[in-house]
Amino acid sequence: VTDAVAQSGATHCPYCALQCAMTLTPTATGAEVAGRDFPTNRGGLCKKGWTSAELLRRNDRVTAPLRRGPEGFAEVSWTEALDEIAERLRATRAARGADAVAVFGGGGLTNEKAYQLGKFARIALGTSRIDYNGRFCMSSAAAAGNRAFGIDRGLPFPVEDLDEARTILLLGSNVAATMPPFIGHLVTARADGGLIVVDPRRSATARLTEDGAGIHVQPAPGTDLIVILGLIHVVLAEGLADLDYITARTTGFDAVRRSANAWWPERVQETTGVPASQLRAVARRLAAGRGTFVLTGRGVEQHVDGTDTATAAINLALLLGLPGTPNSGYGTLTGQGNGQGGREHGQKCDQLPGYRKITDPDARAYVAGVWGVDADEIPGPGVPAVELLSMLGREVEALLVHGANVVVSAPDAAAVRRGLDALSLLVVCDFFLSETAELADFVLPVTQWAEEEGTMTSLEGRVLRRRRTVPAPGEARSELWIVRELARRLGAPGSWPVDAAEVFDELARASAGGLADYSGLSHALLDTGVAAHWPYPSGSTGTPRLFTERFAHPDGRALMVAVTPHPRDPGSQRGGQLTLVTGRLLEHYQSGVQTRRVGELVEARPEVTVQLHPATATSLRISMDDMVELRNERGTVRARAEVTTAIRHDTVFVPFHFAGDGCANLLTEAIVDPISAMPEFKRTLVTVARVDDTAPGPAVPVLA
Amino acid sequence: MMRVVVVGFGPVGARFVEGMLPAVARGDASLTVLGAEEHDAYNRVLIAEYAVGRADRDRLDLVDTAALRAADVDVRRGEAAVAIDRSRRVVRTSSGERIRYDRLVLATGSRANVPTISGMESARRERLVRAQSPESLDRGAAPLPRGVAVLRDLADAERMAATVRAGGRIVVLGAGVLGLEVAFAAREQGAEVVVVHHGDVPMARNLDLAGGRMLSRAARAVGVEVAPHSRAESLLMRTDPLDGQPRFDALVCADGKQIPGDLLLLSVGVAPRIELAAAADLAVSTGILVDADLRSWTDPSVYAIGDCAHVADRGSVGADGRVPGAPSGLIGPGWRQADALAERFSGSGTDAVTPAERPSVVMLKAEGVDVVSGGDVSADPWDDDPHTDGCDHVRQVTQWADPARGTYVKMVTRSGVLEGFVAIGMPRTGAELTLLFERGSELPADRAALLRLDGDDAGAPSTADAFAPDATVCWCNGVTVARISAAAAAGAETVECIGEETRAGTGCGGCKGRVAELLARTAAG
């Protein structure tokens, strides 16, 4: 780690996929953050971004490799750690086969790391078992996008296109808390009364519809698909569909039309709690022209029917003629910092770089050529995240975790913890001692955002440079170096550069001809500040807007897929039974490993809270700030009550940023979408009671 | 391979067929479906909208016969079942063909009732006469007089559409949910409409008296005339100048009142088509008697779903020979039955459990008139509860009425769970009560919380005063009024200074105006 450290760095925020531009200036104790003008954030930053430099000043970094011994963790040298890890990986592989070793990646890793990790799993470990936490994030929207458009780029247009739109439908997205500077792009729509937010909570984003700025639709949790089918029904019934567009640019219309005929507004009302009249008003507004966008978020995607729900949202957009039409479109709002790039270069179990399919013989042959191996040496498809985690201690004996905190972020967290405990080897790369790292046999210290070079691909598919501004503390190294060292010890074929620019060049070659083609890009070109939206094949100038001429299917058309809801009977909710939805707070990010270490954020949101409606609170004798227990067959969570009318009476909300007995995922279930393998994060039955309410009698005082 | 024959290709029969497709594809079952009509199955629920010209024919489509045939389903349209030979397990069709079955599913639906009115006796159909051809399925000895119609199938709808297009006057006899839907829809499309019914209030089967009054008022408010306490007795006919034939001129009521119109639409309920089952000696009551598994009381190879199916416990015949209950006549339960039966037929030996029959929710489909109800709503707030067995299980009735604004709600609960409800003019409240009723979930103890969903303050900021100390000004950075005021008091005088001090306005920048306003107030104060 002897590279010269830049004196001042134009870089991007370490957190979400909006990737706000910032300037980092090194100081005696770390660095100072300033907003930087850029189309997405226009110089603004949110509370997390402004305080991000505090992560560089923390004195609880992991600064040397740690090995678990009888007395707990002890620092060891890199050589000792890597030698032993390599030896144990080799032994596991010899005893149980290559697939007994698995890799779990993250959507926060740079493109270079994500690429190298996928390659490392396939040709150094020889395992098919790699997947990543993006499975919990973008998988449903990605599956729906691929099916409908033949390609998956979150926003197929630059964010600024939203600026002129008069109508924006946000389906299950709380941007005001998750990527606040984004709301600057909603100004025109709000001024025109056209912001429509679908969310069971009156979230900060839903509140942006107040005072005539739009409409808040508040369905019961898990009924989004039916709401969208109802909108489609009204669009068709009232002749609001763009039939010329449908004829010219899509296939599958007839089946979609028939399937939506069964969802007239009154029937939708019966299942969702959304009034028929409101549904009609929303559909009419969407079709009012003058620029309409349909955007989905995790609220509608993180369900067992998430792919179908995103598909229905795409169908709605296609019926209205939005995708590929100027000043209009459909998109999904990517969550994690590199949630887009992280899903393109081989961390996904069924994927090779450039968004290629690992089952496609041509793709295998091409990538094998870049890697310098035989196509036969690349394993076949592995298993998605939830299934992978269910194998721990059984089919999988050793696990390497990079940029993920599964014991907090995965569903049924207690089962995940039991799985991790049952491993013979757990290696976690992180810069702080995350809750998952605490369980590891080895913790390897890595660099964080301001200490490394690389690229990130933002929610609009724009490739951005992350720049090194400050030195890494102690012995912390980039994963690129760690992967190289392990590959060498394992006698892996291929080359393993540690310079991010060099890795990027290889990634660009490997992606050439794929859907996510980066072959025309390099760090040097990106350093010129070019707006690089992929596909960016060699010789091109990139693609800010997809679909203007054609979709990515061979026939150039978008495919509408008819979807049928299979509503799970939620059963009766009595005696304190409520539906739990999980989600985010403005002040925290993901599993909270970073933001729970930033003083100002912790001060604002020190502990886990549970939102519940005043009427529900009264019934359960819960008051503001009481400690509340949420319980089901998987676990128990304790949280402080936040009594608010911003939530439905039958629903509670718990953010998933906290660990210990405040970990919301102790309650969620490890059931998944059959297509995307997305877990169900937003519809979990729990029983809620005040902590000291040990013997709940009749909770309601009855006058009779 | 199991041979399944479905009699009836309406929405419920079609839904069952779709549910069976995977089993057909696997080669586990063969499927033949008989439909008397020449058309693909269509959505009868929306027939009123089609009849008034508000919905295209396209919108009624539910299945694609070509696709079903491509999936190896033998779809026969325009072919009626005329007899069932249960001993040989054969269905005889109107074309003379005999089709063997292992399992027979009756989805014959129901037909519109024709009331006993002088002048149209011969149009009434004998309940147990079997049809020998598709055309005679619903026909009496004579057709309905000209200018008199029911609204059940596409042909009915097309006849009615002509009257609506001509801006004619429609007399709707009957004030059930279908009659009212037609009335409202026709009125919206510009027709003159009068609803004639013999009771106190419309939708008397679904609403209590107060709710019915509210609905009458709502109907009149949108220009639908309502004539209560009117018992239809006979028809007055006139000679059509165009062809010299007699046609409907006015409805004459028992009190001598004459209600003129261009079309008399009969909307006095439906009767399940049970004659085919009855002739095959299958147990029938109001409908074809089946147990909770939808299997005939009489023959384990025969099933019934939808409007023709009368679900009751086997042998639950009262002393008077009647069987409690009746088909609901609603599409939702019919579709649930179709799904459950298809799943059971396709199941790997294990019998899927049929969802318990729940009392149905009835919602009036009319724009601008929100009426929804479910269950038993006859109880009054001050009624004594005869079933008191401990304070927990007392029936509670909560009621809200605001005739001036056209809003009315009644919630009848036991142990906090709805037994019945009505909501009029309150769409959000009605939608939530529907959910609570359907799911059998417990209501908030403060029932008024549900009423407030439709209040003017619903969705209002939780801090009413935008300048209250804890009101958030900058969402991006979570900065409150109090924090900005403190910074201003400490000398931050400009929006930029406030931004540096508190970060308000340094995210999306959308709150800079409010920061400036706040500073101005502080300065003025």
Image (tube, grey):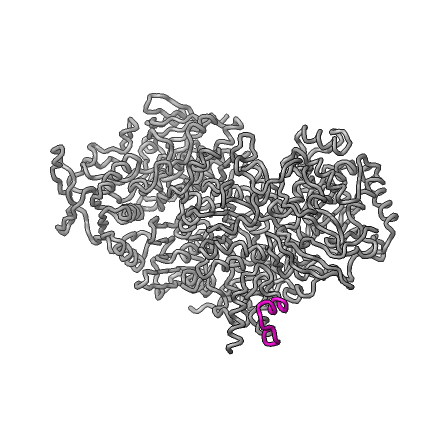
The residue closer to the viewer here, A702 or A448, is A448
> How many tags in the picture?
0
Q: Position of residue B434 (x, y in %)?
A: 42, 53
- State the predominant SS element of the stretch in magenta: helix
Q: Is residue A679 left or right of residue B339?
A: right
Is B301 covered by the magenta stretch?
Answer: no
The residue closer to the viewer here, B395 or A22, is A22
Can residue A63 be seen?
Answer: yes
| Residue sitting at x 53%, y 75% | B522
Quarter in which the C terminus of chain A is drawn: bottom left
The quadrant in which residue B458 appears is: bottom left
Q: Which residues are magenta?
A: B487-502
Task: Check the image and report above or below for A265 versus A95.
Answer: below
| Residue sitting at x 23%, y 49% | B195
The residue closer to the viewer here, A286 or A106, is A286
Is B495 covered by the magenta stretch?
Answer: yes
Can residue A438 be seen?
Answer: no
